[in-house]
Image: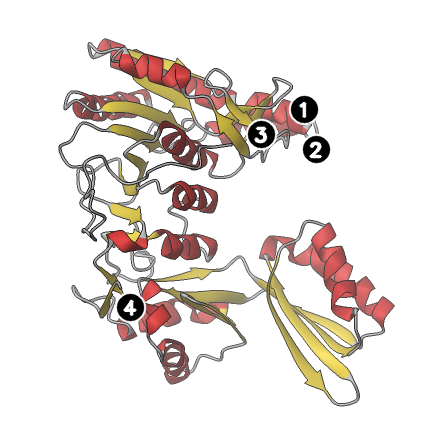
Amino acid sequence: MLPANLSGGLRGRDKKGDKIEFKGIGTLMALIVQKFGGTSVGSTDKIKNVAERVLRQQRQGHQMVVVLSAMSGQTDKLLGMAADMQAMPDPREMDMLLSTGEQVTIALFAMAVKAAGSDAISLLGDQVHIHTDAMHTKARIKEIDTELVHKHLDAGKVVVIAGFQGVDDDGDITTLGRGGSDTTAVALAAALKADACEIFTDVEGVYTTDPNICAQARKINMITYDEMLELASLGAKVLEIRSVGLAKRYKVPLHVRSTFSENEGTWVVEEEKIMESMLVSGITYNKNEARITITKVPDQPGIASKIFQPISDAGILVDMIIQNTRQGHMTDMTFTVMRTDYARTMEMVQKIAEDIEAESVTGDESIVKVSIVGVGMRNHSGIASTMFRIMSGEGINIMMISTSEIKVSCVIEEKYTELAVRALHSAFELDKENPPRVEQQ
């Protein structure tokens, strides 16, 4: 397993345990893991620029581990080749194929470092001993052997590691699925007890909402693991949710920043490291949603299991569920699934409805889930009612509601997405330089 006794945080932090504001890496010598995605290393010129960026930090005395994705477009090209060979490509062979993309990038990067007068070594997932389970195309990391990485770091080298891949107990190459390079970087940072893990993307950091639909969106300087987990699960695409979960578990400070800028990005850290949190930190939306309703379901013990067990067995994720009671021991059951699973789910539910003698099944793909997220909600009432009031004022009907300790989600018609996001962003004053905040206790 990954080490469970990681100290997290930064070397040189307050040893008294006093609450201090998180300030980033600072000038202390640090072990830093940096991950660069496909857009950042999409050409040889971009790889050279990234190599120089990494070397600037190494020259300041930091030990550098770099995790790279395949060059942009390379994975799609490999997927196309696989489809030409086999209608449903064998998962093991698919992993063998897809893992080659990162091998190209890390080798070119190491060459760029050497050409700049420094030393580097490129390593594949199996060489670093990133041990995973045997679930090809969506493997999970079990443990990492850090001895080889430390050996090369102590020799003064930049260690360049292929993201997205590992090796199972049989010695077969595995890949980690969508967002796997983020997961590789955070897992390495945890295992190496790194001072920080920096995720470089094509955006400046985490924003209060999608800047593409709200020009007033602002970059968040610091956000908690819990808030980032909620944002990632609710549609924000900056970080992959598994990587955030790992970072939280092992207290790895995450820094999300742009490859194409020197500006500070967004730090994702423990809640106690933030002096104040925004009442609402962010607003996000997810259009990959579909709603299904089964009407006049017999209100009997075991009915819910008969509906949802086959859906679960098919690997389909059910999100929100609402049950409305009718007269005559009947009920209506409404739930949401990913839009990509809608057709398959409808086909299954039609058969289930016949078996349980429900009246009818209807569905709707033209919906969106809009959510507000913030740890400040824990100790403040009225957040949900404000959200509902804003929606009502804009003439937006709320179809479904889901809440947790730090988020409220509403399902609405998709055509109102931009209107809802902008109205909520303004209502919670996220467009202001100093929105409402709450001091951490």
Label 2 packing within 10 angstroms: few (<14), some (14-19), many (20+): few
Secondary structure type for disc 1: helix
Residue 347 visible within the image: no
Q: How is the image coloured?
A: secondary structure
Q: CA distance from mark 2 to mark 4?
A: 47 Å
Q: CA distance from mark 3 to mark 1?
A: 9 Å
Q: Quadrant of residue 436?
A: bottom left
* Crowd band around label 3 with a 10 angstrom C-alpha radius: few (<14), some (14–19), many (20+): few
Q: What amino acid is at disc 1?
A: Met
What residue is disc 3 on?
Answer: 80
* Residue 85 circle label: 1
Question: Which of the 4 image quarters holds residue 157?
Answer: top left
Name the kind of residue labelled 2 in the image: Met
How far apart are the alpha carbons under marks 1 and 4?
Answer: 53 Å
Camera-near label (1 vs 4) is: 4
Cα distance, mark 4 to mark 3?
46 Å
What residue appears at the point 63 percent right and 68 percent down from the top-left corner?
A: 335
Q: Which one is closest to the eye, mark 4 or mark 3?
A: 4
How far across and how far down the image is residue 22, in percent?
21, 48
Q: Kindly identify which numbered label has been placed on residue 279.
A: 4
Label 2, label 3: how far apart the Cα atoms are? 12 Å
Q: Secondary structure at mark 2?
A: loop
Indicate which disc, 3 or 1, sits on the residue closer to the N terminus.
3
The disc label shown at residue 388, or none: none
Observer-side mark, 1 or 2, equals 2
**Residue, disc 2:** 88
Q: Is residue 395 above or below residue 238?
A: below
Q: Amino acid at mark 3?
A: Gly
Could you tell me which quadrant the C terminus lies in? bottom left
Q: Residue at 21% of width from left, 58% of height from top?
A: 275
